[in-house]
Image (spheres, helix red, strand yellow):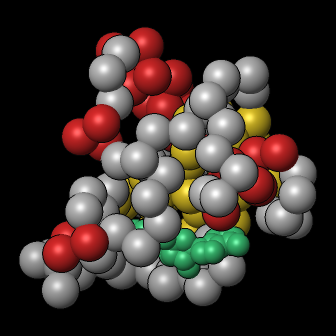
């Protein structure tokens, strides 16, 4: 497992920075976003460091993250939710450890801003 000590989300995985953990398994962590944009706003991350979706180089990691999204939403009876990945600074990525936002609990407009 790759750990980058300068990465905020790696430090959350390591337990150096506190987080409200919603779900986890050996590969994936789901925790609450500190600046929620909806009543439910969680972040799904691989426990190993990878800077964004474009940098993922194994299919297993996509499956692990997809499984985590299914498992955490099912555990919380969430059927209607949005997943968002900002890939790159111009797309809104501010933390460079791949994460998928899960948003729910209010009407979600389309197209997004
Ligand atoms: P993005 O802009 O797509 O890279 O999303 C990064 C997200 O991380 C933002 O929604 C932030 O609110 C969230 N965030 C930043 N620091 C923390 C933290 N310590 N714990 C939980 N979420 C965080």
- The foreground one among 74 and 23 is 23
x, y percent for residue 83? 36, 55
Q: Quadrant of residue 74?
A: top right
Of residues 30 and 105, the one drawn nearer to the viewer in this rendering = 30
Identify the image quadrant of the N terminus: top right
**Residue at the spot 30% in from the left edge and 36% down from the top edge:** 55
Ligand 1: give its quadrant: bottom right
Would residue 14 be seen by someone viewing this image from the given angle? yes
Picture coordinates of residue 105, whole percent (x, y): 52, 74
Q: Is residue 57 left or right of residue 69?
A: left
Residue 71 in sight from this viewpoint: no
Height in image: 70 above or below 18?
above
Is 1 drawn above or below residue 41 in the view shown? Answer: above
Q: Quadrant of residue 112?
A: bottom left
The relative height of residue 70 versus residue 30 in the rendered view (above or below) is above
> Residue at position x 61%, y 57% from top?
7
């Amino acid at each position: 497992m790759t750990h980058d000590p300068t990465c905020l989300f790696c430090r959350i995985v390591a337990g150096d920075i506190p987080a409200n953990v919603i779900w986890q398994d050996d590969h994936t962590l789901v925790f609450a976003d500190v600046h929620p944009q909806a009543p439910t706003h969680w972040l799904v991350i691989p426990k190993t460091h990878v800077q964004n979706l474009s940098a993922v180089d194994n299919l297993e990691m996509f499956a692990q993250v997809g499984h985590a999204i299914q498992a955490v939403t099912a555990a919380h009876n969430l059927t209607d939710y949005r997943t968002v990945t900002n890939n790159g600074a111009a797309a809104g990525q501010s933390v460079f450890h791949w994460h998928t936002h899960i948003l729910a609990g209010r009407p979600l407009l389309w197209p997004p801003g």
